[in-house]
Image (cartoon, helix red, strand yellow):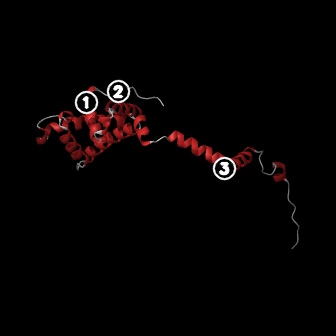
């Protein structure tokens, strides 16, 4: 698959950095994974259709700048708020009665969560190694079902077992017993 020529702007990275901490807790900062998660988000955004990418970009823009109009933020953008206020603001969007705002923040959270859980260091901490598991299961299935698979392969690859066409064309004589 060819990826789109897309990269996150500085403003987008400025918004996503604190949002990564809100979505993934403080552990992401402790492990120093914020930039890596944002890079994964960027890579994922390159792989999605342009209309979804546009929707996420617009949603991120309004998420960042929408904080300006709330009295509790004292006219500051999302990325300039304290960690506590960022969490509160995120929850306001998450539970907002406006469907479009909820979907925008859910889309951003999904990309961040996907980027976080796909990092090799996080997989290692969880001892999550799907490649190893797939290899083990494949070897076990080959051992347990190998003979059956070979029989099925032989049956599928064998010459056509149907009756020869000349046999089908032969006339059948019926007795006229009435």
Q: Position of residue 81 (x, y in %)?
A: 17, 36
Number of numbered labels in the structure image: 3
Regarding mark 2 in the picture, which secondary structure is present there? loop
Whether residue 106 sits left or right of residue 70 in the image: it is: right
Regarding mark 3 in the picture, which secondary structure is present there? helix
Label pair 2/3, CB-CB below 8 angstroms: no
Q: Position of residue 83 (x, y in %)?
A: 20, 39
Whether residue 101 sits left or right of residue 75 in the image: it is: right
How many other residues sit within 10 Å of disc 1, few (<14), some (14-19) or many (≥20)? some
Question: Looking at the image, is mark 1 or mark 2 nearer the viewer?
Answer: 1
Does label 1 or label 2 sit earlier along the sequence? 2
Question: Looking at the image, is mark 2 or mark 3 nearer the viewer?
Answer: 3
Q: Position of residue 52 (x, y in %)?
A: 35, 37
**Res. 48 visible in picture:** no
**Numbered mark located on residue 145 in the image:** 3
**Which residue is located at x 65 percent, y 45 percent?**
142
**Numbered mark located on residue 7 in the image:** 2
Q: Position of residue 33 (x, y in %)?
A: 34, 33
Residue that carries the numbered disc 1 in the rendered image: 14
Does label 2 or label 3 sit earlier along the sequence? 2
Distance, label 3 to label 1, CA atoms, is: 54 Å
Distance, label 2 to label 3, CA atoms, is: 47 Å
């Amino acid at each position: 698959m060819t990826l789109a020529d897309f990269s996150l702007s500085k403003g987008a990275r400025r918004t996503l950095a604190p949002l990564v901490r809100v979505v993934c807790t403080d552990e992401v900062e402790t492990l120093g994974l914020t930039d890596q998660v944002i890079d994964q988000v960027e890579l994922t955004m390159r792989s999605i259709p342009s209309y979804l990418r546009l929707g996420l970009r617009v949603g991120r823009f309004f998420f960042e700048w929408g904080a300006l109009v709330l009295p509790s933020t004292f006219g500051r953008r999302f990325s300039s708020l304290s960690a506590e206020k960022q969490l509160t603001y995120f929850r306001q969007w998450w539970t907002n009665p406006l469907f479009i705002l909820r979907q925008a923040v859910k889309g951003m959270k999904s990309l961040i969560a996907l980027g976080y859980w796909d990092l090799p260091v996080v997989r290692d901490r969880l001892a999550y190694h799907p490649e190893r598991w797939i290899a083990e299961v494949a070897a076990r299935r080959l051992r347990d079902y190998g003979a059956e698979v070979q029989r099925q392969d032989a049956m599928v690859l064998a010459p056509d077992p149907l009756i020869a066409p000349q046999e089908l064309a032969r006339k059948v004589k019926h007795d006229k017993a009435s």
